[in-house]
Image (cartoon, rainbow, N blue to C red):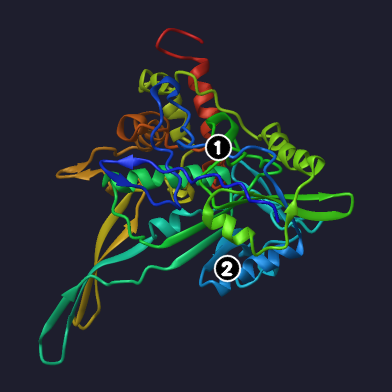
Amino acid sequence: MPPIPIRPRATAENNGRITSPSLMNCAAGTRRDRMRPSPPRGPPVTAGDYHRLPREGLDTLVALLARRGWIVVGPVVRDGAIVLDEISGAGELPIGWTDEQDGGSYRLRRRDDEACFGHVVGPDSLKRFRLPPALTVFSARRGPDGEITMGRPEREPRRMAFLGVRSCDLHAMGILDGVLRSGAAPSASADETLIIAVQCGEAGGTCFCASMGTGPRAESGFDLALTEVIEDGEHWFAVEVGTPAGAELVGDLPVRPATAEESQEAALRPERAAAQMGRTLETGDLRDLLMGNLEHPRWEDVASRCLSCGNCTMACPTCFCVEIADTGDATGAEAGREQRWASCFTVDHAYLNGGSVRPTTHSRYRQWMTHKLSTWWDQFDTSGCVGCGRCITWCPVGIDITAEVAAIRASDERGGAS
């Protein structure tokens, strides 16, 4: 086998520390293009450095990871959606399934082929593994003799291999990692991670990653990247290597160098997806647009439809709000303190002494959207949105962040219609 080209994993220094090599850092955006999260520093993967892996080689890959002690997490069909879960074989992937998404609508349907990754993103994301929905941060137990023991539960780091990660979620993980390193929310994960990305071959109905500069092609931040090709009765994967760990894996897989025609076919897949985006968002001067229209009547309009349910924040791969809750049992023998996901759409989230500073749906929706698209830049020097479209799909009433921005832009009160 000829030498495998290695694309070094991008890392970034932060106050003398180096980010985890398994998490792409997209937090270091530039202010020249404020609304596009910058791809990580480091050489991008060059289209054409492909190896061909037959369809059965995907089973080999999952088995190889398991033998080497990795816990493999990939997309599976469960409860009418495609979510992330541990898998023991490639047969557990959503083979032959796709998802149809629109505002407030998500449906699974059968494809006319046996694609393993013929879907886009579901309600789940890598956030759940980096910032767990519930985490015990302190516990106390009283023994039979009255002695009280206290402490924080310790968990051994795991070796997690994430299969099927999309470019938007790679960017989201990098953004969230920057947030956690800043101390804005405590992180719970010290797991060793391996990232096997999948290049998007088609876009979903609510995707707008092309507008945000976060996809559909992953250019860095992965150990391996797969492009699924089903053409002329053949089913195979084009494999790109991102790190030495990825190169080591490929060395034990049944691959061969891709031909020029195969490489071209693989490279065209994300380009086709970019042309199929279900939504678009004009990002020019977006930060100033929103901050200059804080009293725009559109906020009241969207508030009349918003249920303040918080679905958008729960599904968002970068939202990081948490709350602290005390727990205990009926006997008083055990007590604890938990960190749990929270949402800025709840009245209590903005509660200060004397009451909530955001008592209306109007103020809470405005807080969420202006933070995500505008003041996140001031706080973390990047946008908080990666264009995955989850907030649109999983809103019960189909509120569309791209439509709300377009409505404000159409009647910009800073200086008349734009």
Mark 1 crowd level (few <14, some 14–19, many ≥20, 10 Å Cα) = some
The residue type indicated by label 1 comes to Pro
Name the residue tied to disc 1. Answer: 44
Q: Distance between the residues labelled 2 and 1?
A: 25 Å
Direction bottom: furthest residue: 144
Q: Residue at x 52, y 36 (%)?
A: 43
* Residue 63 location (% of width, % of height): 63, 71
Direction right: furthest residue: 232
Q: Nearer the viewer, residue 41 or 168?
A: 41
* Residue 229 location (% of width, % of height): 77, 49
Q: Which residue is drawn at 56% across and 43% down?
A: 167
Rendered view: 150 above or below 347: below
* Residue 54 location (% of width, % of height): 77, 59
Q: Is residue 214 left or right of residue 101?
A: left
Rendered view: 129 above or below 402: below
Q: Residue 65 carries which label?
A: 2
Inspect this view and state whether residue 197 appears.
yes
The residue type indicated by label 2 comes to Leu
Q: Residue 326 carries which label?
A: none
Inspect this view and state whether residue 347 appears.
no
Q: Which of 162 and 152 is in front in this view?
A: 162
